[in-house]
Amino acid sequence: MSDTRSDEGRAPNDLLLAVARGGDRAAFSALFRHFAPRLKAYLTRLGAEGALADELVQEVMLTVWRRAGDFDPAQASAATWIFTIARNRRIDGLRREARPEIDPSDPALVPGAPEAADRAIETSQDTARLHAAIAGLPGEQSELLRLAYYEDQPHSAIAERTGLPLGTVKSRLRLALGRLRRTLVDE
Amino acid sequence: MPSHHPSEEMLMDYAAGSLAEAPALLVATHLALCPECRHRVSAFEALGGVLLEELSPAPLGAEALDAVLARLDDPAALEPPPRTPRATVTAAPATPPRPAPLLPEPLRSYAGGDPDTIAWRRVIGGIEEHVLPVARTDFKACLYRIAPGVVVPRHTHGRSEMLLVLEGAVRDRGMRFGRGDVSFADGGIDHSPAAEPERPCICLAVLDGPLRLTGPIGRWLNRFVKL
């Protein structure tokens, strides 16, 4: 990014909160410049080609604008929240399936323990640790993680595609997840 | 709290968005009953966010940002409604307060109501089903209502069977599965789950591939019954 406007240096969480509070277009533009090219890469890897990828990116960013008020930094980072919007948009737009999800206000939902007040700080530390932990994974493990997120394939299909036995795919992913979990729990 | 959970891989596939609708329905319904797995799925979504940040950016057309900015206040460009009908979100308690529904969302919307208000079709003696609408035909999702003490005939599966118990309990392969518990039977497993004798059992089943009865009577029944 060569843009030197002050918004470009702000953390995505702050930009998204600025959008939520006052419909801040400059903050939204900075978010767009940061996330739209990554969303396009994500949707392209999942099979959206050319103009369709651009159109889906625009729809995801429009949803970000309209639903910014739902963003809760205590629950997730901006990148995670935007990831879930893009994920749901591509299930609907590329796979033509519904995305079954819980309804947080459903009286039949079993409530969890209340979140601690300092959870937002934890979330941002988790994010930094996750970045470092992924960078520290052996290549074969991080590649499988990416396949699990960027290819529209459950584990069994990844095994077929990579020619690895399903047991190997599962054990490598377990190793990767184990390392990531230790990073988040132990440090 | 449930004690039998979906596998870690399945929770990850759900968070990544690669699970097909039918198994995703089972996972989401388990999540409504299991705060622990909700927490795990949040962690997998955080992983998705980190991986999104790490992708090499792909350039968009030069006018993409302007095109979006021009649409920000466009009332015509409203979001498509979610494909699953949402239950009304009014939280105001009715008077007198009604008990919480038996089926949590998203399952209740797929079924069109709770078990006492929906239509059931008899499969074989003591077992009824209510088929749920899912997009793909290589999966079958349905609710089963199994009368107290009834043993499901011994069977194997083309590929796999997942059960989520919603009421009562099932005993299978020496284990007990109660409300919120998930039982997974792989293609090769030959089993015959049984409802506990005290009350009927209601469960969500997701079948991947055809089911084949394997006992001597079951082999004969295969010709007549489509489970």
Image (cartoon, rainbow, N blue to C red):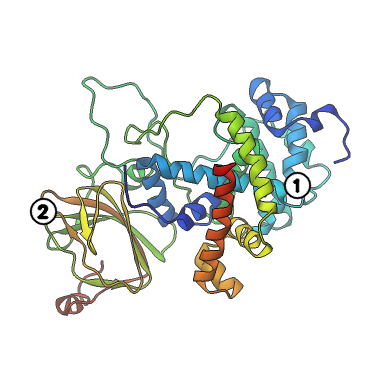
Residue B6, given in percent of the width and then of the height, sits at: 40, 54
Q: Quarter-wise, where is residue A161 in the image?
A: bottom right
Q: Amino acid at mark 2?
A: Pro
Return the residue at label 2: B197
Q: Provide the secondary structure element on which disc 1 rests.
A: helix
Q: Quarter-wise, where is residue A164 in the image?
A: bottom right
In this view, B218 is above or below A187? below
In the image, taking residue B114 as reference, residue A39 lies left or right, namely right
How busy is the neighbourhood of tag 1: few (under 14 within 10 Å), some, or many (20 plus)?
many
Outermost residue, front direction? A186
- Residue occupying the point 71% across, 29% down: A15
Return the residue at label 1: A37
Q: Provide the secondary structure element on which disc 2 rests.
A: loop
Q: Amino acid at mark 1?
A: Pro
Labels in figure, total? 2
Residue A160, given in percent of the width and then of the height, sits at: 55, 73
**Residue B66 appears in the picture as rendered:** yes
| Residue A86 circle label | none
- Residue occupying the point 36% across, 24% down: B91
**Residue B20 appears in the picture as rendered:** no
- Residue occupying the point 31% across, 42% down: B1
How busy is the neighbourhood of tag 2: few (under 14 within 10 Å), some, or many (20 plus)?
some
Asked whether A28 or A178 is in front, the reply is A178
Asked whether A127 or A109 is in front, the reply is A127
In the image, taking residue B56 as reference, residue B126 lies left or right, namely left
Residue B29, given in percent of the width and then of the height, sits at: 37, 46
**Chain where mark 1 sits:** A
Residue B60, given in percent of the width and then of the height, sits at: 79, 48
Q: Quadrant of the C terminus of chain B?
A: bottom left
